Amino acid sequence: MSIAKVGSVKSSGAAIDYVFKEEKNAPKNPETIGGNVLGETKQEIKNEFSEQEKLNFKVENTVTHISISFPPNEDISNQIAAQYADNLVEKLGYEQNPYLVVRHFDKENKVQNPYAH
């Protein structure tokens, strides 16, 4: 059973920096496992989201951040985690928006968590 936490943030850049951030004491090993963005590097992805944000200057919180946590005893492959995130994005009606699925270790409990943006 997984747990999803949904929030919104003002900056896609900050959200992208967060999921790709490496910790010195607890490596997160971020890995892009899905989504519909074209960019491959962190900077290309940030640029792509930034261009989308410019299309509607009236929106304050431009990013929905969804954190999906799986139990530590479940061995979830990247393919299954990406499919789970894709299904969640579709059920929320966000599939026409740019989104990114990044999997990394949570520094607090070492559980692998995919993140969808």
Image: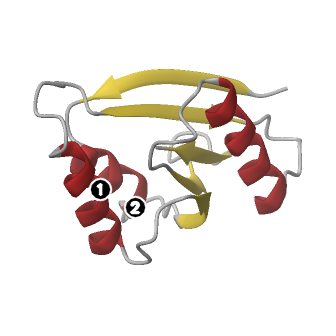
Residue with the most extreme left position: 57
Mark 1 neighbour density, 10 Å: few (under 14) some (14–19) many (20 or more)? few
| Cα–Cα gap, marks 1 and 2 | 5 Å
Label 1 with label 2: CB-CB less than 8 Å: yes
Query: Which residue is depicted at the point 55% across and 22% down?
Result: 5
Query: Which percent across, then down, holds residue 106?
Result: 55, 46
Three-letter code, disc 1: Asp
Horizontal and vertical percent position of residue 50: 21, 54
Q: Which residue is tagged 1?
A: 17
Q: Secondary structure at mark 1?
A: helix
Q: Is residue 78 left or right of residue 66?
A: right
**Tag 2: residue type?**
Phe
Q: Quadrant of the N terminus?
A: top right
- Give above or below for 26 relative to 94: below
Residue picked out by circle 2:
20
- Residue at far bottom of view: 41
Question: Would residue 78 appear left or right of 33 to someone viewing this image?
Answer: right
